[in-house]
């Protein structure tokens, strides 16, 4: 008698694939963050619970500031619901100034400010000098000068931060930061 083992092999293959996917989800899910955005270095990061106090240079995942969803998700810069991945640049008491062309933090130039995105669509306008408020941070992208960050939405409450991240393996591309 000849038994057809093909369906069994297919079922076993599907089971192994599902096992690998689920194991990867459990491993990468809450503890790891795969960054594919050029706003910060592309790579694999460990995700940690938010620690206090935050320091300049800490990398954070944060929820979209209220009122800016139409830019982030409506323009497909990020998949709906995904967090932003930024670096803490300003802390409470720091002064940041946004002009028509530049962002400065405590008198030091941080980067350019644009009126329109790469497709010519207008960006939110934030002008003038402000002080980072208590329990807020100024979140900036360090890898892409055209990134949507604090130069457009200002300081954000610490309550929007999902957690901090630390690099495990990153890839630096030549010429990054230019569009």
Image: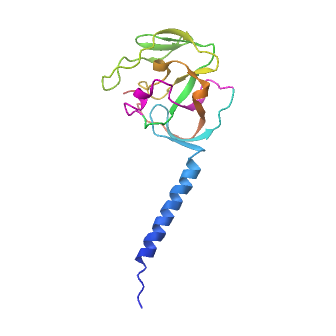
For the C terminus, the image quarter is: top left
Residue 176 shows in the view: no
Residue 17, image x, y percentages? 48, 62
Residue 169, image x, y percentages? 54, 42
Judge whether residue 66 is colored magenta: yes
* Main SS category, magenta section: loop
Residue 72: image quadrant is top left
Please give the name of the residue rendered at 61% of the width and 25% of the height, measured from the top-left corner.
Answer: 158
Please give the name of the residue rendered at 47% of the width and 18% of the height, measured from the top-left corner.
Answer: 151
Residue furthest to the front in view is 67
Residue 81, image x, y percentages? 48, 36
Residue furthest to the right in view is 52
The vertical placement of 100 against 7, above or below, is above
For the N terminus, the image quarter is: bottom left
Residue furthest to the top in view is 128
Q: Is residue 125 left or right of residue 142?
A: left
Q: Which residues are magenta?
A: 53-77
The vertical placement of 2 against 55, above or below, is below
Residue 60: image quadrant is top right
Residue 162 shows in the view: yes
Q: Quick one: 77 or 63, which is closer to the camera?
A: 63
């Amino acid at each position: 008698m000849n038994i057809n083992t093909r369906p069994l092999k297919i079922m076993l293959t599907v089971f192994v694939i599902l096992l690998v996917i689920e194991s990867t989800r459990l491993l990468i899910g809450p503890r790891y963050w795969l960054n594919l955005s050029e706003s910060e270095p592309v790579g694999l990061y460990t995700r940690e619970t938010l620690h206090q106090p935050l320091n300049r240079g800490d990398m954070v995942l944060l929820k979209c500031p209220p009122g800016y969803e139409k830019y982030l998700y409506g323009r497909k810069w990020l998949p709906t619901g995904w967090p932003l991945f930024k670096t803490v640049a300003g802390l409470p008491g720091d002064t940041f100034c946004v002009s028509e062309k530049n962002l400065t933090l405590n008198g030091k130039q941080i980067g350019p400010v644009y009126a329109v995105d790469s497709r010519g669509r207008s960006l939110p306008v934030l002008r003038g000098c402000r002080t980072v408020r208590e329990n807020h941070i100024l979140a900036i992208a360090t890898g892409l000068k055209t990134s949507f960050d604090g130069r457009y939405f200002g300081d954000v409450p610490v309550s929007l931060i999902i957690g901090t991240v630390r690099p495990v393996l990153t890839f630096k591309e030549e010429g990054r930061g230019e569009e």
